Image: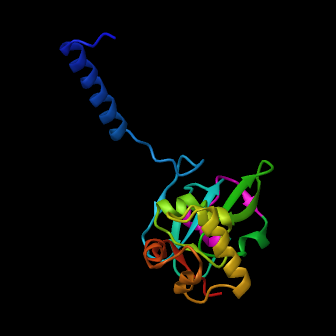
Amino acid sequence: MKYFSKDRQLIILFFAILLTLSSLIHRPINLGSNDNLIINKAKAGNYIEVLGEVRTPGIYSFDGRITVNDAIKMAGGLNDGLIIEEPAQYKSMKKGEKVTVQKVLKNTGVVSLGKIDPNKLIILSIPIDINTAFKEELIAIPWVGPKTASKIIEYRDKKGGFSALDELLNIKGIGKVKYNKIKQYVYISKS
């Protein structure tokens, strides 16, 4: 087996370092399918995501009660000439939800509600409600795998929900160390 000469080794090393540095400098963060994601953290509090046929799609914070109409206004309003059904405008939204406005006809849009992608929540340090989270959402939490997520859901269903975060310590596989690592990523809804 032949070895590289010193000159070739230096050239290979130089390109390896250059390649590594270029990947570190230009590392895009993928938060999902929306390329125009804007995060408005003007106020601390609850977060909702607004997508689709609005002027400024993104994740917005709010305090107190918010409706679909309020969320759309936060996102700069509907795109030119678009209207949505009036009852949809007054639906209440909760922390961690997303509203998507889709165009169905030339000037008509429909609204659909869902949950913000759990990976976005974790990346943005927005806690996940353990009383309503699906298994996929719990798995997005660092140090929570599929087995632990299933045990959390099983405990929640058996007890009728969590009333305090430290109840997580009652779940097999979650000790004090793991609990201290994951507690920043979860919360308990008041409703």
Residue 83 falls in image quadrant: bottom right
Residue 164 falls in image quadrant: bottom right
Reply yes or no: does residue 97 show up in magenta. Answer: no
For the question of whether residue 97 can be seen, the reply is no
Q: Nearer the viewer, residue 14 or 123?
A: 14
Q: Is residue 57 left or right of residue 26?
A: right
Q: Nearer the viewer, residue 158 or 186?
A: 158
Q: Nearer the viewer, residue 5 or 12?
A: 5
Q: Is residue 188 left or right of residue 27?
A: right
Residue depicted at x 68% and y 68%? 134
Residue depicted at x 50% and y 69%? 126
Residue 95 falls in image quadrant: bottom right
For the question of whether residue 101 can be seen, the reply is yes
Residue depicted at x 56% and y 61%? 140
Q: Quadrant of the N terminus?
A: top left
Q: Classify 177 as above or below 158.
A: above
Q: Position of residue 77 (x, y in %)?
A: 61, 61
Q: Nearer the viewer, residue 158 or 110?
A: 158
What span is colored magenta in the figure? Answer: 69-84
